[in-house]
Image (cartoon, rainbow, N blue to C red):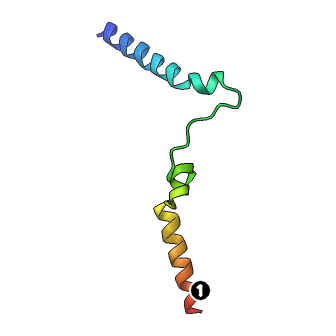
Amino acid sequence: MLKTFLLCVVIIGLCIVMLSVRILLKKNGQFVKTHVSQSKAMRKRGIGCVQGQDFAARHKRKRVKE
């Protein structure tokens, strides 16, 4: 039981180190931005965040009524 626990801790530790290599070694390293609105390729295609599009549509509709 203890061997299994230690093995899991070592594996999780290695995974964390491997995931953070880019951040630690690169100057001003950051995680890759995965949100739709932060992706250059999605912005080029005109695809945005659903929440942002919903907000814009609701805001636009209110202005038309006034």
Q: Residue furthest bottom?
A: 66
Q: Which residue is drawn at 55% across and 72% down?
A: 56
Residue furthest out toward the right: 27
Q: Is residue 39 visible?
A: no
Q: How many marks?
A: 1
Taking depth in this image into account, of 42 and 2 the one nearest to the observer is 42
Tell me what residue is drawn at x 48 percent, y 70 percent: 54
Please indicate, yes or no, whether residue 51 appears anywhere in the rendered image: yes
In the depicted structure, whether residue 24 falls above or below residue 36:
above
Quadrant housing the C terminus: bottom right
Which residue shows up at 40% across the image and 16% down it? 11
Specify the farthest residue to the left: 1
Amino acid type indicated by mark 1: Arg
**As drawn, 42 above or below 66:** above
Rendered-image quadrant of the N terminus:
top left
Comparing 4 with 64, the one in front is 64
Q: In this view, does 60 lie to the left or right of 50?
A: right
Which of 14/43 is in front? 43
Q: Disc 1 designates what residue?
A: 63
Residue 50 x %, y %: 46, 63
Secondary element under disc 1, as helix, strand or loop, is helix
Q: Percent from the top left, x then y, of residue 51?
A: 49, 64
Residue at 49% across, 60% down: 47
